[in-house]
């Protein structure tokens, strides 16, 4: 999917030569300390930050440096870490914007499907998104991208600011569920242990480069990784 | 009492004209993030196109108004395309765009004056019969302007709430990056917003000139004070707030003209603007995010 990608702002690379391969049905997680370039990498994949070198493709189609609205048409759904909903719009309107590229009758069908996935949203369809709790808001953000039935889901710290129980439910029930349903999930996550539990492959970023990568079980056996990210507890 | 009621009548008409203008002005600001201080200049230039078609093209003033609306729409689109967007792309401080807009306003207004001169103009148009309601007097022309304003308010509310374009406009206003990630072509939405809000400027300019009876190239130069007061009263970037703000400012300024001094109309509007900026900068309808 991403080959030797370098990306950054104003012509200065923040991430350097990164390879990411993600296949349908798999969760690839990206972990690393603050400032390691995790969010910049994701933003470059979805067209928000310019790619300065390398290439990105989805299903064999080159999407390098395409505008975000074009990348959305290619089945890539992106949930940013912050500002992930439209606060003045109602829950229903947020979902409708998520389905902006669909025909009108398809929008109603997809809203029904998304509400089956997130039944809690049913009761709050007329509520403004800005009035939702953190967990409800994140469900709406996920629901918004699911409107287009994306083949690739790019999620930037979806559990940030969520209570531990809600975060665990989001990761293990919903995000792992997306992959099990056939989507490719690319996940940046601060809770390394929780991320590894649902991942098929993990990249560890440091200073804008991949410093480690591998299957979660293998990383859990790596003393450097355990020391840095799992707080000394190797059990996933 | 009769002075109060007749002033209230004037206030309702002023509010109607101001509401059309403010809704376009605030929509422009909300979606495009440009405080277009040249709005008054677009209004008066559009009013003069209507005048040209009415007097020299021998068209009925209501038919000629279509030309004024089209002028406002196209002029605003071009203004954004060739002046504001190039400046925005350079990521300059917001104050730069305000200064550019001020320059455009001066060029538009005094450029027009250089062409038409300093004379007064009026449309060839009948005021129609006079109607009496609850001690207030309205001409048929004034009632038509009020009806147009109500129609515009309903149309804008319908556009924003029920149409795909309107929801895309609100999404672009709230979070342009997220809108793009959702597949919304925000540049197209912004261009369309300039066309629609410009059309409202053209309409407002023409009905403003119709309502005042006589007008000149600089007639709308201070109108920006009323626009800003109405916008900040309702909440910057809040079209529904703009409607309420326009009604309040329109009526308050006409009542102050009757009971204090007509010279102080703009001062009253400016005081309301200062009061809102001091105590509630996000307006009656806005949230702190919009301030």
Image (cartoon, coloured by chain):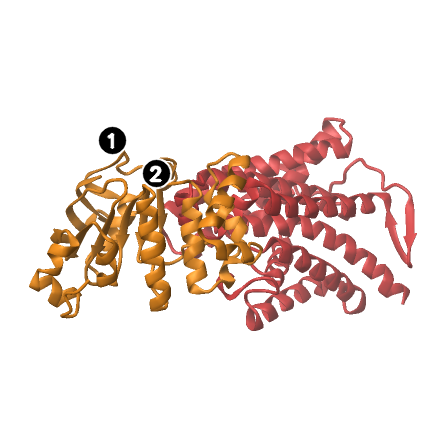
Chain colours: A orange, B red
Residue B291 visible from this viewpoint: no
Question: Does A190 sit left or right of B204 as displayed?
Answer: left
Residue B177 position in % (x across, y down):
40, 48
Instruction: Please name the residue that numbered disc 2 is placed on.
Output: A71
Residue B79 position in % (x across, y down):
50, 40
The answer to which of A134 and A54 lies nearer the viewer is: A134
Picture disc at residue A184: none
Residue extending furthest toward the top: B57
Instruction: Please name the residue that numbered disc 1 is placed on.
Output: A60
User: Quadrant location of residue B185?
Assistant: top left
In this rendering, the answer to whether B147 lies above or below B54 is: below
In this rendering, the answer to whether A92 lies above or below B183 is: below
Quadrant containing the N terminus of chain A is top left
**Residue at 73% from the left image edge and 55% from the top image edge:** B15
**Residue at 69% from the left image edge and 61% from the top image edge:** B249
* CA distance for labels 2 and 1: 13 Å
Subunit that carries the residue with mark 1: A
Label 1 SS: loop
């Amino acid at each position: 999917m991403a080959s030797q990608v370098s990306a950054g702002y104003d012509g200065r690379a923040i991430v350097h030569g990164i390879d990411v391969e993600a296949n349908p049905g798999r969760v690839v997680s990206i972990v690393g300390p603050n400032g390691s370039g995790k969010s910049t990498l994701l933003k470059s994949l979805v067209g928000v930050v310019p790619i300065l070198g390398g290439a990105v493709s989805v299903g064999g189609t080159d999407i390098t440096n395409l505008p975000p609205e074009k990348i959305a048409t290619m089945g890539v759904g992106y949930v940013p870490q912050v500002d992930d909903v439209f606060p003045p719009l109602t829950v229903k309107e947020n979902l409708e914007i998520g389905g902006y590229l669909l025909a009108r009758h398809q929008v109603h069908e997809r809203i029904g499907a998304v509400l089956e996935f997130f039944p809690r949203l049913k009761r709050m369809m007329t509520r403004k998104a800005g009035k939702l709790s953190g967990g409800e808001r994140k469900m709406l953000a996920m629901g918004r991208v699911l409107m287009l039935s994306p083949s690739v889901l790019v999620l930037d710290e979806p559990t940030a600011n969520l209570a531990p129980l809600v975060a665990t439910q989001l990761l293990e029930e919903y995000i792992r569920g997306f992959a099990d349903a056939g989507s490719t999930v690319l996940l940046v996550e601060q809770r390394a242990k929780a991320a590894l539990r649902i991942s098929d492959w993990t990249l560890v970023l440091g200073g804008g480069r991949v410093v480690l990568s591998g299957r979660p079980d293998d990383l859990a056996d790596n003393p450097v990784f355990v020391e840095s990210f799992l707080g000394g507890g190797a059990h996933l | 009492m009769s002075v109060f009621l007749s002033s209230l009548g004037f206030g309702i008409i002023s509010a109607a004209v101001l509401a059309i203008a403010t809704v376009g002005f605030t929509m422009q600001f909300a979606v495009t993030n440009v405080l277009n201080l040249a709005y008054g200049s677009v209004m008066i230039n559009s009013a003069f196109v209507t005048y040209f078609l009415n007097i020299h093209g021998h068209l009925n003033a209501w038919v000629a108004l279509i030309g004024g609306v089209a002028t406002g729409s196209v002029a605003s689109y071009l203004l954004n395309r060739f002046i504001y967007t190039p400046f925005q792309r350079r990521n300059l401080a917001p104050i730069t765009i305000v200064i550019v807009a001020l320059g455009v306003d001066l060029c538009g207004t005094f450029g027009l004056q250089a062409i038409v001169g300093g004379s007064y103009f009026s449309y060839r148009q009948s005021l129609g019969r006079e109607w009496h309601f609850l001690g207030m007097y309205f001409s048929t022309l004034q009632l038509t302007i009020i009806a147009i304003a109500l129609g515009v308010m309903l149309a804008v509310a319908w556009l924003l709430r029920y149409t795909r374009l309107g929801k895309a406009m609100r999404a672009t206003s709230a979070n342009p990056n997220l809108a793009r990630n959702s597949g919304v072509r925000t540049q197209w939405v912004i261009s369309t917003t300039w066309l629609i809000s410009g059309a409202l400027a053209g309409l407002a300019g023409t009905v403003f000139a119709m309502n005042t009876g006589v007008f000149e190239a600089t007639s709308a130069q201070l109108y920006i004070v009323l626009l800003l007061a109405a916008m900040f009263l309702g909440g910057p970037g809040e079209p529904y707030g703009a409607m309420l703000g326009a009604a309040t400012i329109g009526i308050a300024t006409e009542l102050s003209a009757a009971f204090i001094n007509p010279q102080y109309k703009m001062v009253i509007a400016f005081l309301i603007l200062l009061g809102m900026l001091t105590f509630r900068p996000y307006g009656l309808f806005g949230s702190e995010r919009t301030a």
